[in-house]
Image: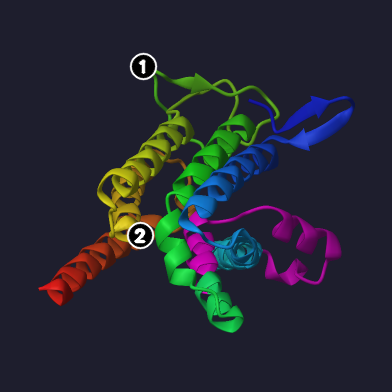
Amino acid sequence: MHIYIDFFGLHIASYGLMILIGVSIANIIVRVMAKRKQQDFNDFIILESYCFLGAFLGAKLLYILVSFRYIDWSRIGDLQYLKALFSGGFVFYGGLIGGILTVILVGKIYKIPAGEYIRDYIFLIPLVHAFGRIGCFMAGCCYGIRYSGPGAVVFPSGCFAPSGVKLFPVQIVEAAGLMAIAMLILGLQMRFSWKYTVETYLFLYGILRFILENYRNDTARGIYWNFSTSQWISLGMILFSVVCIMFKRYQME
């Protein structure tokens, strides 16, 4: 559990390293699956590249929105403060929304069937996200509430989490849940040619995140009518997925 990993004198950020591992594994999987599906891997790389850009902007924008009152706007012209503001602080849901919208837009521009790629490879989002949560655990960010039951963790000094205090391992629990979602969707695709991959992901992760928000210690990101910002978005995702499934089934009748 350290923010940086020493590798031959280099200080590598734990979170960034885990994301890199997750993305690398995801690309290997796509390389194999795209060949079987007779899809152009280069099209995927184009969508993926723009997805990262959209996800970065979306995650940062939502962070600014939910943390608006905690930002010292009087120092916004200070380059050091501005650098610190943009180098840290991201909200996953903002990245998810920004990334998907960007992929859809780029698909139209480049004449790439973005919907097909999203449907076929949506399981990679929870897969990479799981590695990201492991990175969160290693760095101590997105930490859980005080907890002394089974599996409690104590972070060392130098992490984002308070040191010497027993906390709920919410990052690891979420990583396990995300990995299970990814494997379930992939299994349904391979065995049943499952058509509701996107809806399944939105529904299951919405439930997972809504529950785990109760065990996260980041109320600074906004509580509205007893629910956090992420819980409201989770409810919206759950409702949206149910409506989409009902609509698709109605069209098939």
Residue lying farthest to the top in this orientation: 150
Q: Residue at x 81, y 72 (%)?
A: 77
Q: Which residues are magenta?
A: 72-101
For the point 15% across and 72% down, which residue is it? Answer: 252
Dot label at residue 183: none
129 falls in the magenta region: no
| Furthest residue in direction left, as rendered | 253
The answer to which of 138 and 249 lies nearer the viewer is 249
- Residue in front for this viewpoint, 223 or 251: 251
The x and y percentages for residue 227 are: 32, 56
What amino acid is labelled 2 in the image?
Answer: Val
Vertical comparison of 195 with 19: above or below: below
Q: Which one is in front in this view, the residue at disc 1 or the one at disc 2?
A: 2
Determine which residue is flagged by label 1: 150
Q: Position of residue 73 (x, y in %)?
A: 69, 70
Q: For the C terminus, which image quadrant? A: bottom left
Give residue 96's position: percent from left, percent from top. Answer: 49, 61
Binning the other alpha carbons within 10 Å of mark 1 as few (below 14), some (14 to 19) or many (20 upward) gives few
The residue that mark 2 highlights is 198
